[in-house]
Image: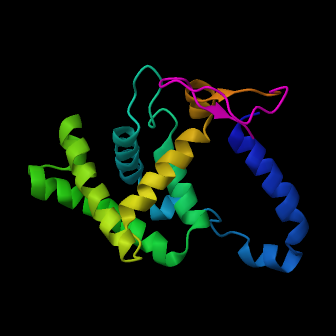
Amino acid sequence: MNRRDAISTVAMLLGGTLINTDAFAFNLGKNVSGAVSLFSAKDIALLDEIAETIIPETNTPGAKAAKTGEFMTVMINDCYSSNNRNIFIKGITKVDEEAKSKFSKGFMDCSPQERKSLLTVLDAEQKEFTKQRKTHYFKIMKELTLLGYFTSEVGGTQQLVYVEVPGRYDACIPYKKGDPVYLNP
């Protein structure tokens, strides 16, 4: 069973007991997820490329292999407030606009080095916004990229090391640079 099936099953079990029939009948026929209406395939492809720039493919798969663009759209639609959702949606177009103003071409047409330099500028910009206690779209993108990648099957099995039954608790274990990080539930 993959992660999506497990989450869906748990949601059905828990959510089904909490929702009464009137609420169900009221929402009947509506698009519950709404992700299709908020984000186009072009938006998802752009988010995949942004995520791939943040976590590129090396000897392990990158963020695009974990389908983080699709993950971001689901999380934004289902879990974020309308204010943060609007900031994120406007941010998708801002990334493309910034690329056009800086490189005279869209983000998708930029080289990997140009993409990295643009996202580095946006990261510095979001750090200044955070100091002023404002929400910046790139911070949301970056956080969702990390969450989507490291909770995916690709990130959890090929990037992190999972020890199902570690045996005993070792508070301090030696760590050398380059050692994999452990994923413990």
Q: Is residue 45 above or below residue 85?
A: above
Query: In the image, what residue occupies the spot 82% across and 52% down?
Result: 10
Question: Residue 55, located in which quarter of the rendered image?
Answer: top left
> Magenta segment, which residues?
166-185
Give the answer, above or below, for where 112 lies relative to 92: above
Q: Confirm whether residue 153 shows in the render.
A: yes
Image side of residue 7 versus residue 96, left or right: right
Of residue 161 and residue 93, the one placed in the foreground of this image is: 161
110 above or below 141?
Answer: above
Taking the spot 74% from the left edge, 48% from the top edge, the residue there is: 7
Give how far across and how far down residue 81 sits, in percent: 55, 74
Q: Position of residue 162 (x, y in %)?
A: 70, 28
Residue 43: image x %, image y %?
Answer: 38, 53
Give 54 or 87, whichever is nearer the viewer.
Answer: 54
Judged by its main secondary structure, the magenta piece is loop
Residue placed at 74% from the left, 26% from the top? 163
Q: Is residue 133 magenta?
A: no
State the residue in front, 113 or 38. Answer: 113
Q: How is the image coloured?
A: rainbow
Residue farthest to the left, as pictured: 104
**In-image side of 173 versus 133 (left or right):** right
- Relative placement, left or right, of 89 versus 175 is left
Pick the quarter of the image with the N terminus: top right
Image quarter hosting the C terminus: top right
Percent position of residue 183, x then y: 67, 35
